[in-house]
Image (cartoon, coloured by chain):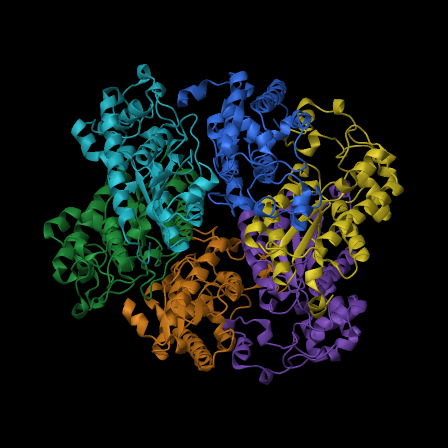
Chain colours: A cyan, B green, C orange, D blue, E purple, F yellow
Amino acid sequence: MTSRDTEKIDKSRSVALVPVGAFEQHGPAMPMATDQIRAVALCDSVAKRMEGTAFVGPELPVGISIHHTTFPGTMSLAPETFIQVITEYATELHRNGWQRVLVVTGHGGNNSALGVVAQRLLQEAPSLEFAWTPITGLAADRIRAFGTAEVTGHCGEAETAQMLHVAPHLVRDELLQPGTTGLDEMDSLPRLSRRARPSLSVTWDRLSANGVLGDPTRSTKELGADIIETATETICDYVRTWIGIDRGING
Amino acid sequence: MTSRDTEKIDKSRSVALVPVGAFEQHGPAMPMATDQIRAVALCDSVAKRMEGTAFVGPELPVGISIHHTTFPGTMSLAPETFIQVITEYATELHRNGWQRVLVVTGHGGNNSALGVVAQRLLQEAPSLEFAWTPITGLAADRIRAFGTAEVTGHCGEAETAQMLHVAPHLVRDELLQPGTTGLDEMDSLPRLSRRARPSLSVTWDRLSANGVLGDPTRSTKELGADIIETATETICDYVRTWIGIDRGING
Amino acid sequence: MTSRDTEKIDKSRSVALVPVGAFEQHGPAMPMATDQIRAVALCDSVAKRMEGTAFVGPELPVGISIHHTTFPGTMSLAPETFIQVITEYATELHRNGWQRVLVVTGHGGNNSALGVVAQRLLQEAPSLEFAWTPITGLAADRIRAFGTAEVTGHCGEAETAQMLHVAPHLVRDELLQPGTTGLDEMDSLPRLSRRARPSLSVTWDRLSANGVLGDPTRSTKELGADIIETATETICDYVRTWIGIDRGING
Amino acid sequence: MTSRDTEKIDKSRSVALVPVGAFEQHGPAMPMATDQIRAVALCDSVAKRMEGTAFVGPELPVGISIHHTTFPGTMSLAPETFIQVITEYATELHRNGWQRVLVVTGHGGNNSALGVVAQRLLQEAPSLEFAWTPITGLAADRIRAFGTAEVTGHCGEAETAQMLHVAPHLVRDELLQPGTTGLDEMDSLPRLSRRARPSLSVTWDRLSANGVLGDPTRSTKELGADIIETATETICDYVRTWIGIDRGING
Amino acid sequence: MTSRDTEKIDKSRSVALVPVGAFEQHGPAMPMATDQIRAVALCDSVAKRMEGTAFVGPELPVGISIHHTTFPGTMSLAPETFIQVITEYATELHRNGWQRVLVVTGHGGNNSALGVVAQRLLQEAPSLEFAWTPITGLAADRIRAFGTAEVTGHCGEAETAQMLHVAPHLVRDELLQPGTTGLDEMDSLPRLSRRARPSLSVTWDRLSANGVLGDPTRSTKELGADIIETATETICDYVRTWIGIDRGING
Amino acid sequence: MTSRDTEKIDKSRSVALVPVGAFEQHGPAMPMATDQIRAVALCDSVAKRMEGTAFVGPELPVGISIHHTTFPGTMSLAPETFIQVITEYATELHRNGWQRVLVVTGHGGNNSALGVVAQRLLQEAPSLEFAWTPITGLAADRIRAFGTAEVTGHCGEAETAQMLHVAPHLVRDELLQPGTTGLDEMDSLPRLSRRARPSLSVTWDRLSANGVLGDPTRSTKELGADIIETATETICDYVRTWIGIDRGING
């Protein structure tokens, strides 16, 4: 897209999508860029379906992965740096006329920081509407229906399924192996950290020896297709409502 | 508590509690310090029940309330400032020998920032175990059983109930009035912002004219007592497990 | 005080008081919150006497206590963090219409930082009038008349007296004991640091083994009452003049 | 590449490449990601030729483009943010065992910031060897031989040639048009800014109405292939020498 | 002084002097660098008298002058920038082996910031002994004996006297004129700001129309010589004691 | 210069010069302030020739010398601190009405940071015209004609020549000695770092044992005079053009 192309977009009726992920261990079988690959795939899927009203902006391929840094290859930004970069992405898009920015994060470790970005922008760019969303959570019902191990998540059934659908050539099927699948496989402290509240953080090596939560060997391409479709439709429905709104004092 | 008193505490078998809240509008009937008052009350309740193993540290009476600043009297810290202060509270407690810090926040606007603090501390103080929790969420089932308006939350049934229990003299019963109680009372954008995902932030005046979500007039002292009791017992059970754990490489 | 209450205050004829202290060792007999307790007590005393024209805002219970961190229990904010928090307190009060903010600090370690805050605010909030004051210094003549040891100050005659007056239940009379009372009890470097100019900083353990300067056993409730009364009247007289002034270009 | 793959690399004999670019106007015919696309293409070319000794790490798709922000679509990071992100990329790679990091920037606006990163890393990571390079400058002789307009550079003969070689489908040949090609087409101030020394910065709209310096219509696919080949071979020769060096106290 | 010269200094028996001032209005007759000129002159005087044990390090010619920025020519650093620069000066001197650093400030506006620097260094460089001093305050008795106007200070009797002694060629005698000399010449707010406590900051134009406090026309070269001599001897006596001390755990 | 003097300057027809240098090792024979001394001398020379249109502002005597910190006496500012100070110098001069600021740096280690300052100012002070220049580079032809060693630069023929011209009394002729004069005298890594591109940073001790690059013993007072004259005339010609320009939207 050229400079002049961006000028032609009716920004009062469209949304800018920003895919963010992580550069961190994803178990024995999946690439470190897994979260970024899924985020980009979902944004492309939304942009394709909402052609002319949803556009994909620049990526940020490294996220907040401090809890994974005990595994080789993992890179993390400091949380304050991540917050600053996304805030600048959003304010620069707004300076260019965008009134709605939606960040899609393939990595849960970015959620808190994105919540902070949203608070900063309410103050620093009150006329910008900033939203963000994780991916897998958008298809929670579908995943529940599929059935997963007692413990699942990072590199688990759902995440692997998405990769089998959007980038099968990057998944080493022969290396897929179960990680931690039950609470009783964990020491007391990591097990405590799985309670919903209070929220306690531990490094990932205490949750899983191979970095995996759940059983990716049960994962299927079909589940991945369903998750991406559900996530795509959820976001598209959201965007349709969003851009249909007569914009009030905050919009 | 004197300097020497703190020296006598067996910090390998205890937890430091930090109550944080907000200094923001709480509708026509409740004080701006409502969230702080509830957080302190809950911490005191836990410390009393866990005498000798749970201690209350310094408070932070102003939180992140950017979304409430359109209402008179509201004060907010910048998110990065709040993150820095809580990080320093935690590292200072750790320097003094505390191995476990639990922040209790009476204000949901602090949640994202506390998540970021937890990430920073994993890196800056790896031998510290840092946890945080909201209050009302600890008693979700009890509140559901009580029954609330379709839309509820800030200054609503549950929050008012807690104040009627812990600080009845600070609630002006005659000024209690319903706020926004249904989605159809909202404009499109604030209504969109009530969807779970994607997450969109709007300023509070767009959610409610009087700053209230839900119907505090239905609230009861008994509900408040139940919520505080449930929250207290949930935290105490958590702390009992926590301090019973043989501390591993991260603890 | 509710959001609407704050709206009714005639801020062109009133002042907001902010009590700040420290969370640090106060010798064998007094609580770590001593400076905060005295600051709050003085602000309450002023607010009561100036009812309708002086109001107490949020506290900051942790100050700059780097020089006391060799004693157990002491917590300190980084000076830049303390400066940022107080600056935000002041600008948030100003955003809410307050034209005059007075910070009362029970802890001398905050003085330099408050001086820096005042400089920042001259630039960042030129229409705000920001003032700050220590406590004990307001009653210097009275204390001189009482007579103190050659070396006195932290936890000494005057500070203990104030606690005996405002929070006698928090002073362990049986543990009151003299600290360093004469220059010849000090090593050369700490003694040098007691010269007025040049100003040299040393950690507190070099000034006193038990953390006390002066002889708190000589202290009396009556002296405390006189100090608080003198400080209260000095501030009230100041505030009366202040709010009586027709506000010029800087006000 | 998976976490375990990165573990197998002999980092004492290899280099990590980081491609950075810009998200800014590139005239009527080329995409805003032009600099990033060229940087990635060059890094891939080097990594392919140095298989097993050069690896491509994460990208940063937005650079420092403040001087281009008067053109639509341009996004810029604050220089201090760009410096922080690249410093964290480098230190994270170093924490993972990399001893040599080479940043390839397709955008000249990043050069000064990369010079500052190099200075910071000398202090913050003394055992890391950090290098950076622009692209076009590596083939200066070849470009001189080709012959360009008196004024050339951004979107000019050389830059367009590279795009015609690495991403021809993203160049809209029909929209290629000359920009500013001679000093006498400029006003006095931008003309002054073209002197080598002193160095004066002006916004890009003062240098060129269509954002182009030089005549891209004269550009050829062959020139692009030559530039990429020359740049690739220059870097490969550099890397061969680099990894052959017995590492001294700084390496 | 060359690199090797500094190596030969016995830093365990010497002190590094850092002269700091301001770049601000000094009334109709004196240069903006007045505070810096006096600080350098005093440091040179001390270094000469303490040859071999006191050395003058780098200057910082711009200080914190926010309160003077309404007068032409005045430049100010942000307080946090000034604090950072002096902290780096001190830590760099310490890295070079200096154990004692004394900052001499010709400008009172730097005092609070220097107090904060001292606190930071207690934590960041505990083995460094950091001291700072104003100039005029070192000769308070001598100035009192001379007799000044009721209101005096900036550009007044004492400051002008020092310039007449150290840099007479830079004082335009014919332009010397009295500034504000009595409290009754001031409006209420600036008059209030002259009270010792509470401390209130106002911009300088509210204190004096010509920027002067006191009557420089009464000033004499002899007074200046006495002030510099008194200040020199006070500092030299201080330094003699300082470097004579057997260094304890903090030194 | 007094406050009122600065008021009389026609700033629409003049430029403010800021001389910056370094406080770092300059070999066995030259003072650590060498770069600052040369920068001030050049600025004075320009100001004298352009009397009434060029004025010298405040200096910054410490620069970015991280690469020299292995040599005794060297002091360095953190790059971000240097950037902040120069940015504030420039914005403060601009606030005082200056429309053109030219920083003259005697130290190459400041170049990247000055490039970053220029980018920041394009955004933070768009109506300010900010330029910067090194010294020696302005007389490259003259130096080439003189002839230098294969390797030259820091403390070499040209730098020493300037000192022999502007401050001969500060050069210890008897201590002048050649440093590294040829690439074959270097280890592989420092030799690699001498290639123009990619750019690799190493600490100075790896480039030269005595801190010198080139042969200062061949240096002459005449060469120094020529360099300063050439640099002066180049800058004066630049400034004449600059202030003659009718100021456009950026000026």
What residue sits 14% from the left and 55% below the top?
A: B149
Q: Does residue C238 appear left or right of residue D211 in this picture?
A: left
Q: Which corner quadrant of the image does residue A131 belong to?
A: top left
Q: Position of residue A115 (x, y in %)?
A: 34, 46
Query: E74 or A52: which is nearer to us?
Result: A52
Can residue E96 be seen in this snapshot? no
Query: F118 or B189: which is nearer to us?
Result: B189
Q: Does residue F169 appear left or right of residue D89 in this picture?
A: right
Give above or below for C95 relative to A152. Answer: below
- Assign the C terminus of chain A to one quadrant of the image: bottom left
Give above or below for F114 relative to C36. Answer: above
Give above or below for E189 relative to E91. Answer: below
Q: Which corner quadrant of the image does residue A81 belong to?
A: top left
Give above or below for B75 relative to D82. Answer: below
Q: Does residue A53 appear left or right of residue F167 in this picture?
A: left
Can residue C88 be seen in this snapshot? yes
What residue sits 55% from the left and 42% below the top?
A: D210
Q: Residue furthest top?
A: A174
- Assign the N terminus of chain A to one quadrant of the image: top left
What residue sits 73% from the left and 52% below the top?
A: F241
Q: Position of residue F117 (x, y in %)?
A: 60, 48
Query: D93 or B87: which is nearer to us?
Result: D93
What residue sits 60% from the left and 29% below the top?
A: D218
Q: Position of residue E226 (x, y in %)?
A: 76, 71
Q: Position of residue D10 (x, y in %)?
A: 51, 18
